[in-house]
Image (cartoon, rainbow, N blue to C red):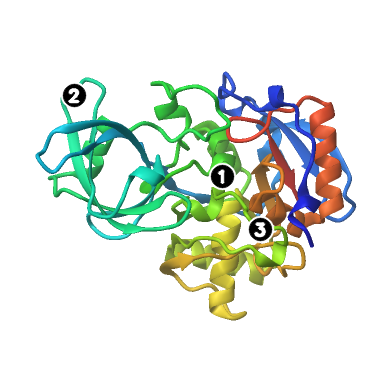
Amino acid sequence: MLVSDFDFELPEELIAQQPPAERSGARMLRLDRGSGEFRDSWFRDFPEMLREGDVLVLNNSRVIPARLLGHKISVAGLVQTGKVEALLTQQIGEREWTALVRPGKKVHIGDTLEFASADGKFSIQAGVIEHGEFGERRLRFDLVPDFFSRLDKIGHMPLPPYIRRPDDAGDRQRYQTVYAQQPGSAAAPTAGLHFTAEVLERIRARGVGIGFVTLHVGLGTFQPIRVERVEEIRLHAEHYSLPEETALAVNSALAKGRRVIAAGTTTVRTLEHCALVGDGGPLVAHSGSTSIFISPGFSFRVVGGLLTNFHLPQSSLLMLVSAFVGREAVLAAYRHAVAERYRFFSYGDCMFVS
């Protein structure tokens, strides 16, 4: 199977540049997993599409202001003229992170980088300690009392490159789910951006259980694909955690023949990876890292329904959705979404597959 088999035409004007006026105001395309039929709807109607006894699982990872702007520092400690940009993608240790650095050709092992807030009041330095492919570097930051607090002061929200504007103050709140708890993501689990406290309460009122997992979104989720064949795709590992309460709720639902609904592809990857770790047995609470890649032919053991945004052409996320419902059905639904002027990608509309 070729990566190009997952291509589709998307007019640039359909790529959402701003979030909807209201979180729950997105359109939603309903896609029947069995028949491939679809119909237009709205996300505000999502709670009524769930059944008593279903379990909805959400990714509670919190997006950090992972985009850092700065300079290289000379040996003498003077700021050089060359500007540097780093996108933190995964925390490796207390002070070490992997990052995508630009311009990569000018950043080498042993270099010191300094990142500062726009007003210059706050800054932090990092040394380059490892060199990877395609601009990836490992950075070791100076020890500071509260790294994430410092990051909040100097970092920018890591809006995807297809959002062609600088981040603004509103993105701090809107490029974040209302239930975000665990800091560490370099991109939002975007299917969750539609939920509000009121929507979650309506879901609970229907007798639907709500559970959480954590998967910190990094290169494994949004890295570009540089191979021609699907079978050659290898994703970077991302850290995840499955709490005991969620494991028990999912196990109970599956034992009773109830649906487990995943909000977002990151949630799907976490649950299905944990099922593979369990080798067919019940899910067990644990933490780890996963590089699971889900494409057509994959056998789903946990997820019975999927809420997801519309994804990039030829992306691993589109392949995951195609694995869940079938490539032709997904591409037909996407063609309909384009014809009906749905809004695409992170700040766009969504699709519910069940």
Seen in the picture, residue 171 relative to 314 is either above or below; the reply is: above
Q: 2 and 132: which one is in front?
A: 132
Give the label, 2 or 3, closer to the camera.
Answer: 3
Residue drawn at 77 percent across, 45 percent down:
7
Give the side of residue 109 with respect to residue 286, left or right: left
Residue drawn at 67 percent across, 68 percent down:
256
Quarter of the image where the N terminus is located:
bottom right
Q: Secondary structure at mark 1?
A: helix
Give the label, 1 or 2, closer to the camera.
Answer: 2
Disc 2 residue type (three-letter):
Gly
Disc 3 residue type (three-letter):
Val
Give the side of residue 257 with respect to residue 60, left or right: right
Residue under numbered circle 1:
204
Task: Estimate the x, y position of residue 353 in percent, counting from the top left.
Answer: 75, 48
Residue under numbered circle 2:
120
First-in-chain label (3 vs 1) = 1
Q: Secondary structure at mark 2?
A: loop
Residue drawn at 47 percent across, 50 percent down:
217
Seen in the picture, residue 308 relative to 118 is either above or below; the reply is: below
Disc 1 residue type (three-letter):
Arg
Q: CA distance from mark 2 to mark 3?
A: 42 Å
Q: Residue furthest left?
A: 76
Q: Is residue 179 visible?
A: yes
Mark seen at residue 271: none
Residue under numbered circle 3:
227
Task: Estimate the x, y position of residue 307 in percent, counting from the top left.
Answer: 66, 45
Circle 2 crowding by C-alpha within 10 Å: few under 14, some 14–19, many from 20: few
First-in-chain label (1 vs 2) = 2
Give the side of residue 344 with respect to residue 182, left or right: right
